[in-house]
Image: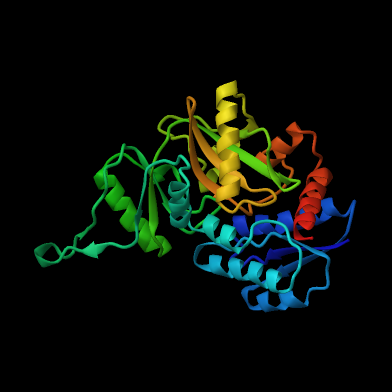
């Protein structure tokens, strides 16, 4: 079988985009043990060329987000039109995991437990003498809340200052974020508990929930346990250096609850092949933060999928072969 590893070329040379490129070459290297492999990086203007690919299977690592997320949807639509077998989510699942508002609405529709939330789309002037002061209505929250740009990924826009403790802090921060990122903002009740990353593989057409990995956060006075952009990407920051990933230690009730909700997310939120569910655990209460339907994939001991794959004795080459074979079988 000939496999093409498809990814988006870095546009801004940001660390998250460069990581996608690094991941593409890492995946290609891991596939070479079992397949003939090529790597193809594309720009927005080259999406239509996908129909000309001469390959048996596409390992799709395209990860455009923000205002460009619909271009990632278009990539998947072109793969479908070309009748090319590919890994990862379909167009619906990709769009859902690129837009936190759509994702939250689907969670509520399917009775999936998630923290309370509200979307702020824009700030309207109040008019009259106070026209210079922007106002908006904040629903009742159990503070603190955490704020996130609706259409970003990889922790973009999330830092220690993203957590707000009252309406005034929320109002000020939302205004600043809308102005900076030029998109709506999600306000979500902050669950002060453990954070787990749950990888789900497709196995003979059914979800296989791997043992969850846990984010062990850096501890420092005044810090909240959150996975910030700096904690993910800035190797010089204390958040990066003092945080780690390890296999989660769970009691029977916690493990059962997580497995059940992870399967439900896979089936109801567009999961395919190797999605990752980000979860907050407070005692036995499980709260789904989001589903990442086409997450970054590597075998690093600091990544959730790397920790979870090792727990079921999957090597890097074995993990990739499992993904390819199950995705190819689905297409056939």
Q: Is residue 221 above or below residue 35?
A: above
Q: Quadrant of residue 10?
A: bottom right
Q: Quadrant of the C terminus?
A: bottom right
Q: Identify the residue at image location x=81%, y=56%.
A: 28
Viewer-closest of 183 and 236: 183
Q: Position of residue 168 (x, y in %)?
A: 24, 46
Tell me if residue 125 can be seen.
Answer: yes
Q: Position of residue 113 (x, y in %)?
A: 46, 39
Q: Is residue 278 above or below residue 282?
A: below
Q: Identify the residue at image location x=57%, y=33%.
A: 258
How many badges with numbers are in the image?
Answer: 0
Q: Identify the residue at image location x=58%, y=70%.
A: 71
Looking at the image, the residue that sits furthest to the left is 129
Tell me if residue 234 can be seen.
Answer: no
**Left or right: 133 in relation to 285:** left
Q: Is residue 144 above or below residue 60?
A: above
Q: Identify the residue at image location x=60%, y=41%.
A: 263
Q: Position of residue 274 (x, y in %)?
A: 68, 48
**Left or right: 317 in relation to 100:** right
Looking at the image, the residue that sits furthest to the top is 251
Coloring scheme used: rainbow
Q: Position of residue 253 (x, y in %)?
A: 56, 23
Viewer-closest of 36 and 25: 36
Q: Quadrant of the N terminus?
A: bottom right
Q: Quadrant of residue 315?
A: top right
**Left or right: 233 in relation to 314:** left
Q: Quadrant of residue 276?
A: top right
């Amino acid at each position: 079988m000939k496999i093409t590893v498809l990814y988006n070329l870095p546009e801004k040379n940001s660390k998250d985009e460069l990581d996608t490129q690094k991941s593409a070459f890492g995946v290609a290297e891991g596939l070479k043990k079992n397949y003939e492999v090529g790597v193809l990086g594309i720009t927005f203007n080259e999406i239509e060329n996908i129909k000309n690919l001469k390959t048996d299977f596409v390992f799709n690592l395209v990860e455009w987000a923000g205002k460009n997320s619909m271009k990632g949807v278009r990539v998947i639509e072109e793969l479908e039109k070309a009748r090319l077998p590919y890994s990862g989510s379909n167009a619906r699942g990709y769009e859902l995991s690129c837009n936190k508002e759509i994702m939250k609405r689907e969670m509520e529709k399917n009775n999936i437990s998630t923290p309370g939330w509200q979307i702020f789309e824009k700030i309207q002037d109040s008019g009259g003498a106070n026209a210079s002061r922007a106002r908006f209505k904040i629903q009742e929250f159990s503070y603190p809340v955490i704020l996130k740009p609706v259409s970003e990924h990889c922790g973009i826009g999330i830092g220690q200052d993203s957590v707000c403790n009252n309406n005034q802090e929320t109002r000020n921060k939302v205004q600043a974020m809308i102005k900076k990122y030029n998109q709506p903002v999600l306000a979500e009740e902050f669950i002060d508990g453990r954070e787990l990353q749950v990888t789900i593989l497709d196995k003979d057409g059914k979800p296989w929930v791997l043992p969850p990995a846990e984010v062990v956060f850096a501890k420092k006075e005044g810090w909240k346990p959150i996975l910030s952009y700096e904690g993910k990407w800035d190797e010089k920051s204390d958040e990066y250096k003092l945080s780690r990933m390890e296999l989660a230690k769970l009691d029977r009730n916690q493990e059962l609850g997580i497995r059940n909700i992870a399967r439900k997310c896979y089936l109801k939120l567009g999961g395919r092949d190797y999605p990752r569910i980000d979860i907050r655990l407070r005692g036995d209460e499980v709260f789904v933060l989001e589903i990442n339907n086409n997450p970054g994939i590597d075998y690093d001991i600091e990544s959730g999928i790397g920790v979870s794959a090792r727990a079921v004795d999957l090597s890097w080459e074995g993990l990739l072969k499992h993904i390819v074979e199950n995705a190819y079988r689905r297409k056939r």
